[in-house]
């Protein structure tokens, strides 16, 4: 990913230098003052008195005041805009057009780089899912009946990630007692290698009877912070009602943890 971006940025830099160089060279070829073109003619006129006879010099001296008076009435010289369209400046216009084309290609390359980086970043986006819910009633040595809830924290992307924080709260709707599971810090999660969670929840006799019919309700709230290949921390919440029955265990989730599901819903 970074190697491709570096090559494209190098090409963009070369195109940018080409645009600046051509623009500066074309600018230097445009005449800035008409007076520079008249200098050779003036120098030739200045040499005329040295070659002319002495009598002609007297005539020129007599006409000098008239010429000075006429020159004082002339308007100051302005930029020779008309010369920009002269045939001599056609190569400069061609260079200007080439510089403009190079600038357009540089902009197109920059947009292509940005689009490719965004596509690669989207392909490397990572997330976790909490799936495969199971439940059963089992007596434990500590006494009484407990509801054992099992679930898996799954990395279904193609790249590994690290769980910085993983906490899940299980709250029994009958007595409002909350039990929290902590997965620990910096837990490595490889692709398609789930991390299993098992929690024991104390239940009463009425809930044992409900387990075979309507089900036992458990409120679930989770907080997950993980870092993937892009080295950007990502937080994912979990919230919903877990219904535990003898036949099935279903989480009625309030939050969809898979970002691709959100994208598909937005497109439809």
Image (spheres, rainbow, N blue to C red):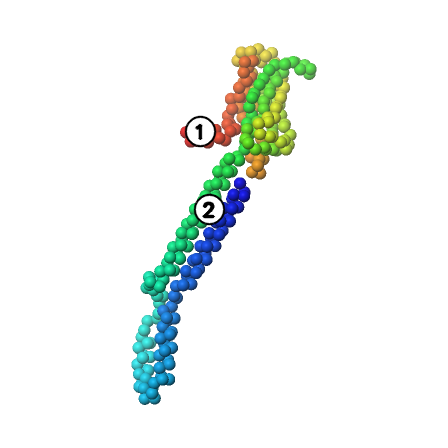
Q: Which mark is residue 4?
A: none
Please report the residue visible at 63 percent of the width from the left and 14 percent of the height from the top: 138
Q: Is residue 80 above or below residue 241?
A: below
Q: Residue furthest bottom?
A: 55
Looking at the rendered image, the disc whose residue lies closer to the viewer, 2 or 1, is: 2
| Whole-percent x, y for residue 149 in the image | 60, 19
Q: Which mark is residue 110?
A: 2
Using the image as rendered, state which of residue 52 and residue 133 is in the foreground.
Answer: 52
How many residues crowd around disc 1 within 10 Å: few (fewer than 14), some, or many (20 or more)? few
Residue 58 seen in the figure: no
Residue 176, image x and y in percent?
59, 20
Q: Secondary structure at mark 2?
A: helix
Q: Is 222 left or right of 30, judged from the image as shown? A: right
In this rendered view, identify the residue nearer to me: 54 or 91.
91
In the displayed structure image, the side of residue 139 where residue 257 appears, left or right = left
How many neighbours does mark 2 have within 10 angstroms: few (below 14), some (14-19), or many (20 or more)? Answer: some
At horizontal 59% and vertical 12% (from top left) the residue drawn is 208
What is the quadrant of residue 161 in the picture? top right
- Read off the residue under disc 1: 265
Kindly state the secondary structure of the residue where label 1 is placed.
helix
Q: CA distance from mark 2 to mark 1?
A: 31 Å
Q: Are marks 2 and 1 in contact (CB under 8 Å)?
A: no
Residue extending farthest to the right is 141
Quadrant of residue 194 within the rendered picture? top right
x and y, in percent, of residue 18 in the image: 46, 55
């Amino acid at each position: 990913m970074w190697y491709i971006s570096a090559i494209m940025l190098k090409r963009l830099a070369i195109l940018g230098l080409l645009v600046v160089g051509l623009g500066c060279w074309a600018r230097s070829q445009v005449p800035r003052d008409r007076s520079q073109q008249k200098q050779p003619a003036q120098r030739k006129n200045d040499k005329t008195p040295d070659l002319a006879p002495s009598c002609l010099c007297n005539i020129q001296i007599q006409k000098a005041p008239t010429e000075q008076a006429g020159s004082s009435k002339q308007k100051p010289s302005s930029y020779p805009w008309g010369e920009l369209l002269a045939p001599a400046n056609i190569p400069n216009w061609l260079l200007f057009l080439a510089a403009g084309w190079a600038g357009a290609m540089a902009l197109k390359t920059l947009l292509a780089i940005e689009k490719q980086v965004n596509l690669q970043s989207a392909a490397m986006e990572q997330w976790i899912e909490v799936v495969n819910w199971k439940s059963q009633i089992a007596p434990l040595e500590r006494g009484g009946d407990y509801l054992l809830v099992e679930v898996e924290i799954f990395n279904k992307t193609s790249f590994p990630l690290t769980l910085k924080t993983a906490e899940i709260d299980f709250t029994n709707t009958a007595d409002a007692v909350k039990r929290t599971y902590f997965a620990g810090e910096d837990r490595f999660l490889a692709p398609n290698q789930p991390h299993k969670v098992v929690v024991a929840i104390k239940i009463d006799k009425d809930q044992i009877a409900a387990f075979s019919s309507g089900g036992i309700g458990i409120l679930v709230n989770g907080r997950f912070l993980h870092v993937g290949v892009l080295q950007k921390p990502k937080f994912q919440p979990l919230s919903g009602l877990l219904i535990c029955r003898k036949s099935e265990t279903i989480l009625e989730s309030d939050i969809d943890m898979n970002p691709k599901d959100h994208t598909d819903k937005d497109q439809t």
